[in-house]
Amino acid sequence: MSQRFIVTKEHRRFTEFADAVRRGQTIGLCFGPAGVGKTLSARRYAHYEKAHELLTYWGPRSDNDAKIYAALARSRTVFYTPSVLTTPRNLKDELNQAITRTNICIEQHLEPPGHDAHTRGWRHGKNYVELIIVDEAERLRPAALELLRDRYDRDDIALILIGMPGLEKQFSHYPQFYSRVGFAHQYRPLGQDELLFVLQRHWRSLGKSLDPEDFTDAQAIAAIARVTRGNFRLLERLFPQIQRVLRINELDTITNDVIEAAQSTLVIGVT
Ligand SMILES: Nc1ncnc2c1ncn2[C@@H]1O[C@H](COP(=O)(O)OP(=O)(O)OP(=O)(O)O)[C@@H](O)[C@H]1O
Ligand SMILES: [Mg+2]
């Protein structure tokens, strides 16, 4: 990812939602349109970027590991994405592995072994994981859903399922599951203020400054808001095109016309 993670209002709302689900040991559904930032928020919450490699490859210990243990001990969260054709058995095995490894990491942080211990083992078999976040949850079939409900009901592990709008309806057909849903959270696109904030960063990265009081800039902002509707992914895709249009035409200012030309090269059909 080229861009740095921006702590948006929606990200903060997601964090509060996840904390509430975790505290309440319940099930939360998070849904929102494609490209608004759901996956990135959830990964950030679970410290996935930091921990992913360690949890996946589980190689020999390295000096950096202590930081990852500490991060996982803070989040107590497992982030999981089922593959497209996942079976309930796969889901169970993969999740068990992720939970076991995360537990081992957390335990290493809470009760570090002597320095000559070079293996990772789960000494106390105690569960420290408090929350599982399942991304792309529409991939879950009824049996997988039932398995999740049953498994985490017994261990008091909270669960968040992330997907597109309509996810709530998909799950409403499974009353046993649905009746346990404690929170539904809608992940929204960037609001006007935040869009401006993000745009200011983009302008700066091009060595320019954006002034909403300036007529040309105000028009450019309005055009970008219209094209992207505050959708993060569209914004990230629009910017390289804007740069390209500027370069090809040897222009220096991002105007309305530049944005329209940039937009015309994108296939924008998502909402
Ligand atoms: N907080 C953020 N800071 C910086 N960039 C972001 C942020 N959130 C999202 N993005 C950008 O938007 C893109 C889409 O975000 P993300 O993949 O999280 O969307 P999503 O809601 O999970 O979409 P989908 O429903 O398609 O899975 C990211 O690849 C990234 O470029
Ligand atoms: Mg996603």
Image (tube, rainbow, N blue to C red):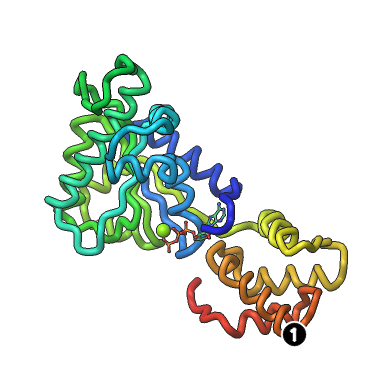
Q: Does residue 137 lie above or below 130 as drawn?
A: below
Q: Residue at x 43, y 53 (%)?
A: 39
On whether ligand 1 comes within 8 Å of the CB at mark 1, the answer is: no
Q: Position of residue 71 (x, y in %)?
A: 44, 32
Residue nearest the observer in this picture, 35 or 253: 253
Which quarter of the figure has residue 110? top left
Q: Which residue is mark 1?
A: 249
Residue nearest the observer in this picture, 166 or 68: 68
Residue nearest the observer in this picture, 191 or 224: 224
Residue nearest the observer in this picture, 121 or 271: 121
Badge 1 density bin: few <14, some 14–19, many ≥20, Cα 10 Å: few
Q: Does residue 221 lie above or below 260 as drawn?
A: above
Q: Position of residue 66 (x, y in %)?
A: 41, 28
Left/right placement of residue 93 relative to residue 235 reads left
Which quarter of the figure has residue 138? bottom left
Q: Residue at x 34, y 40 (%)?
A: 54
Image-quarter location of ligand 2: bottom left
Q: Residue at x 72, y 80 (%)?
A: 258
Left/right placement of residue 176 relative to residue 189 reads left
Q: Is residue 187 visible?
A: yes
Q: Position of residue 67 (x, y in %)?
A: 44, 30
Under mark 1, the amino acid is Asn
Q: Residue at x 39, y 36 (%)?
A: 21
Q: Secondary structure at mark 1?
A: loop
Q: Position of residue 162 (x, y in %)?
A: 37, 53
Seen as rendered, the residue at the extreme front is: 116
Q: Is residue 75 visible?
A: no
Seen as rendered, the residue at the extreme right is: 214
